[in-house]
Image (spheres, grey):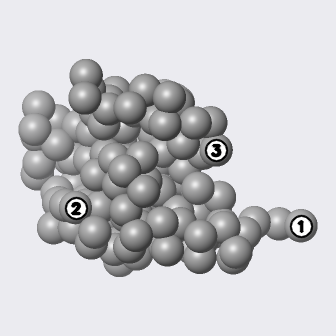
Amino acid sequence: MARSGTLVLDSEGLSKVVADDRQVMTLLRGAEQEDMKVVVSVLTLIEAHHRKVNAARFNWVVSRLTVEPVSEEIGRSAMKLLTDTGLHGHKYAIDAVVGATALLMPKPAVILTSDPEDLGLLCGDRVRIIKI
């Protein structure tokens, strides 16, 4: 059966799944019921992980997600998003990679983020942004 879209987690989305946040877990279960692919960029793993994270829980959560590498295609797409919006990679690189990842995934694509302004600017109306 074909998947019906993609849910992409940014670092706050991933952190809230690891923390078993009620709102985010409800959204995640809804995505799974709709047979959406649930994706996280490998860069998001790096951004969300730190010393105080429960490593066992983090690894278990990540094992249930699709971890997307930063391919050349995603990298070049992220560069184009930055160029098109006039944003600099020094500050917005990871957001651009998250946006590019979402744009290259099966549609409709949804991003769960604590940063809807930047991701909205980068992706426009091509991706649905949900603030968490």
x and y percentages locating residue 57 in the rendered image: 49, 37
Q: Quadrant of the N terminus?
A: bottom right
Kindly report which numbered mark, 1 or 3, lies closer to the viewer in this rendering. Answer: 3
Mark 1 → mark 3, Cα distance in angstroms: 19 Å
Task: Say which label, 1 or 3, has the lower sequence index.
Answer: 1
Inter-mark Cα distance, 2 to 1: 32 Å
Gap in Å between the C-alphas at discs 2 and 3? 22 Å
Q: Mark 3 = which residue? A: 64
- Mark 3 residue type: Arg
Report x, y in % for residue 47: 28, 33
User: Residue 97 lies in what quarter of the image?
Assistant: top left
In the rendering, which numbered label is found on residue 114?
2
Indicate whether 63 appears above or below 65.
above
Q: Are marks 1 and 3 in contact (CB under 8 Å)?
A: no
Between 13 and 57, the one lying in front of the other is: 57
The residue depicted at 27 percent of the width and 72 percent of the height is: 131
Counting residues from the N terminus, which is met first, the one under dot 2 or under dot 3? 3
2 vs 1, front mark: 2
Q: Position of residue 76 (x, y in %)?
A: 39, 36
Q: Quadrant of residue 85?
A: bottom left
Q: Nearer the viewer, residue 50 or 131?
A: 50
Residue sitting farthest toward the right: 1
Which amino acid does the dot numbered 2 rest on?
A: Ser
Kindly identify which residue carries mark 1.
1
